[in-house]
Structures are given as structure tokens and as C-alpha cells.
Image (tube, coloured by chain):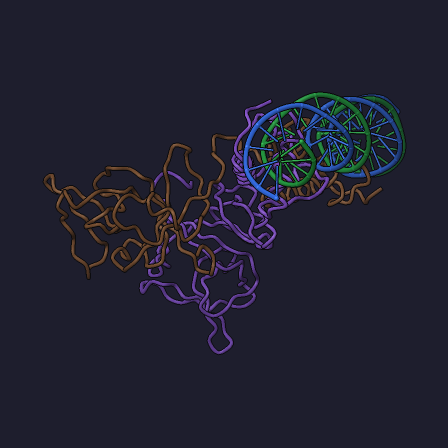
Chain colours: A purple, B brown, C blue, D green
Amino acid sequence: MSPRTKPGVTRERVYRFVRERLEQGLPPTVREVQEALGFRAVQTAREHLERLVLDGRLSKRAGKARGYFLPEQHAGLTPPILIPVLGRIQAGDPHSAIEAPEGHIPVQGKASDDLFGLRVQGESMSGAGILPGDVVIVRSQPTAESGDIVVALVDGEATVKTFRMRRRRVELHPENPDFDPISPKSDAFSILGKVVEVRRFLEGKGG
Amino acid sequence: MSPRTKPGVTRERVYRFVRERLEQGLPPTVREVQEALGFRAVQTAREHLERLVLDGRLSKRAGKARGYFLPEQHAGLTPPILIPVLGRIQAGDPHSAIEAPEGHIPVQGKASDDLFGLRVQGESMSGAGILPGDVVIVRSQPTAESGDIVVALVDGEATVKTFRMRRRRVELHPENPDFDPISPKSDAFSILGKVVEVRRFLEGKGG
DNA sequence: TTGTATACCAGACATTTGTATGGTATCATG
DNA sequence: CATGATACCATACAAATGTCTGGTATACAA
């Protein structure tokens, strides 16, 4: 028999282990918990896990392999996920460009959100603190509200601009006095999504 | 028999499905792929999956339940981890402030790095595209090179500035003409770390 | 034609994995 | 002492899941 620990101590370790594994994207099996904690019986691991579920610190899909997960995921929060970073979007939707992403970066989003990253080219949004080389994280959506920063497809090329409606006409505003607003024709224009986050990497990372 | 598709079409759908599931944190089973794609035979799903593995688009842990994963996660990249975001750092090192973080955000860093997030207050770095409310991600380190953007502790308060050495004297430069450089006395000054990333949340997230 | 590749199916088997039953030992408490 | 709670173990069973063998059908090229 393994040395008996004080009540709660081992369970805390079990919780940490499960949490760590979930953050890595692969939920552990009961037996993996058993091994990691050094139990000689599967059941010991199971008891700790079930207890954690009872306490509300874990949730599970009964009977399913690797069925334990964090209850927050119930409430819309997913674990950190990796989304693709695109260097360039040509005609069509971003998904057709996802074939050859520059890389992936972690975000924490709702499961329902369809997110992707896009590397910014040009100075046109530097007045809003979005500089060339920055990565904008975009939630795919076909519409936007006036004032939103969006990724729009104009004449087959993706661009980041502030979206505004003026007298029922679409205007795309750069945030830089050296650039002029665009009033795209509706047949050569579509919204790919809304920018929900901006990231700048000051070291080699993120490429 | 399900309608036969052109070569590659169904496989693409399989790949998308697996990818989506992985991003949600729970890798699919072969049978879940089968159901999602509407195959009547498990083997059909398996053939697509194995082919994706052969093509290098997926990897797998043979024999293990829910064993398919994206190859990128293999290649030296550490899994995304959650780091604490601090609202304010008072005297002392950031770790003493970690007790009550604002929240956590995911980053992908080397295991050896000691990272934390800090919410930026004030306009002093807006010329470098770092705005009030932005979160800077900081790698803890006691020194910096001239030109690095650092988080420094001056008179017991944390501040984000550009670090410069001028004739063996430390200068902390704001990136905003409305502010003046600081030349802190060495006994009331220390470097907490270097800013390696800047994030701005344009929606409720990240808070 | 033959051969090869692709897409799909049916059924079975073997391993992994979740679950259950029953047991030992220690500690605290009435 | 008896009782209950906790921590842990051994073993077995059943469901979930990965894997295999062999088959049909279509398209295309040698």
C-alpha cells in the first residue's frame, strides 16, 4: 500500500494532474491518473475523480473514454485552443487559406466562435495601435456594427479597417491620416469577421 | 452506400472535423468521426484518418482511445499554458501579487520561461502601440538590453518603459512626447522582466 | 483487358478504458 | 468499543474504442 496521505492532499494532486492534461488537450484516462499518482489500483484513481466530480471541481461524460473535463467548459469557456495564423488571405473565405497557415497561437474562446489569426500588413491602422506584423485575432462573422474593427475582403484581398455605416453606405476607415477611407462597391466587398484581439510579438515567438 | 464523393473531398471534411474537435479539447473517437461524417462503417472513418496520418496532416497514438492529434503539437512546441494577469504590482516581485490575479490568459512559451501578464495603465507607451488597458506579457528576468521594453519597479511601483543604457546610467523612456524619460536611482529601481508580447482585447474577453 | 487507386461497406476481434464489488487499514468520535 | 469517514488495494466485468479481414463499386491508366 502506498503511504497514506492526509485527507485531501492526494486529491489535490489528482485535480492538478487532470487540469494540466486538459490544458494540453488530451483528457487523461482513469488509468493514466492511476499511473501518474502511483496508485496500485484503478479504483483509487476513480474514487478521487468521482469525488472531484461530486465536489463540482470536475465534470464527466459517464462511460465515455477520457470523459473528465473542467466544469467551466460547461459554461462556455473552452480550454486554450490553437487557432491558425494566416499570412495572407486571397479571394474567398479564410478557410480556403487555412491550408497553409503560418503557425498556430493559443486563444481562449467560446466553443461556438470560429476564430482565426491574420498577420497585419501595412501602416494603415497604426493610429489604433495595430502595427505591421501584429497578429489580429478575428471572429468569423458576416456583418459588423459601425465602429468595429473588421477584416474585410475588398477586390479579392483581405484588409483590416474600421467599419462604419454612413447614410446606408459602407465605409472602411484606416486609422492613419496618411490613408484615405474606402467606399467599396457592395459587389466587390464582404466582411470576413470582427477583430476581437490584437497581439504583437516582441521576440522571435509567434511566427 | 453513401454517395461516393470525389477523391479528397470527404477526407477534407474528416480533417476539419478532427481539427475542430481537437480545438475544443476532446479528440474524437473513430466512431465519432464515423457518425459525424455519416459513414455506415467504422472502417471508412478509419481509412480516412489513417490516410491523413500517412499524409502527415495528423498524428496518432496507436491503440489509444481518442489518440489522434495535430502534428504541430508534437514538434517541440509546448502546450499552451495559462498565466496570471496582474492588475497592479506594488513593491516586491510580481509573484507576491499573483495571489489575486485579474484572470488568466493562455500563452505558448518555453517551459523554462517564467511568464506573467500585466495590465497597462496610462498613455506613456502609446507611441509604441501599447495602449491603456492592454495586457503585456512579461518574461521575468533581472536584466535587459538597451532598447528592450521592460517592466521596471521604480519607487515601489511597476511601470512599462523602454530600457536604455546611456553612459552606464539607466534611462527609462516613455514612447510618448507628453512624458519625460526617467533616470531612476539604482537603489530604488529594479527590472522585473522583459515585455515579450502585447495583447489588446477589443471585446469583453480577457478581463 | 488487366491492374491500380479510391471510396465505401459489413462484420468480427482485441485492447483500452470505465465501472462495480469487496476488502484492509487508519483515524476520529460518540 | 462501535461507527463512520477516509485512503488505499485487488480483481473482475462490461462498455467504449482501435484494429483487422474481406468485400463491392467506380474511375482511370497501361
Q: Split into 4 quadrants, where in the image is the N terminus of chain B?
A: top right
In the figure, is residue B166 to the left or right of A125?
A: left
Query: Where does the image place residue B73, in percent across and percent down from the top left?
Result: 53, 34
Q: How many tags in the picture?
A: 0
| In this view, A33 is above or below B155 | above
Q: Nearer the viewer, residue B175 or C5?
A: B175
Work out which residue is located at the far left of the displayed protein and give it.
B167
| In this view, B30 is above or below B90 | above
Query: Where does the image place residue B85, in percent across and percent down from the top left?
Result: 39, 49
| In this view, B181 is above or below A169 | above
Look at 22% across and 53% down and name the residue there: B174
Look at 35% across and 50% down and name the residue there: B118
In the figure, is residue B102 to the left or right of C29?
A: left
Work out which residue is located at the far bottom of the displayed protein and give it.
A167
Q: Quadrant of residue C29?
A: top right
| In this view, A147 is above or below B155 | below
Does residue B19 appear anywhere in the picture?
no
Q: Split into 4 quadrants, where in the image is the C terminus of chain B?
A: bottom left
Does residue A207 appear anywhere in the picture?
yes
Query: Where does the image place residue D12, in percent across and percent down from the top left?
Result: 79, 25
Q: Nearer the viewer, residue B12 or B39?
A: B39
Query: Where does the image place residue B199, in percent across and percent down from the top left?
Result: 39, 51
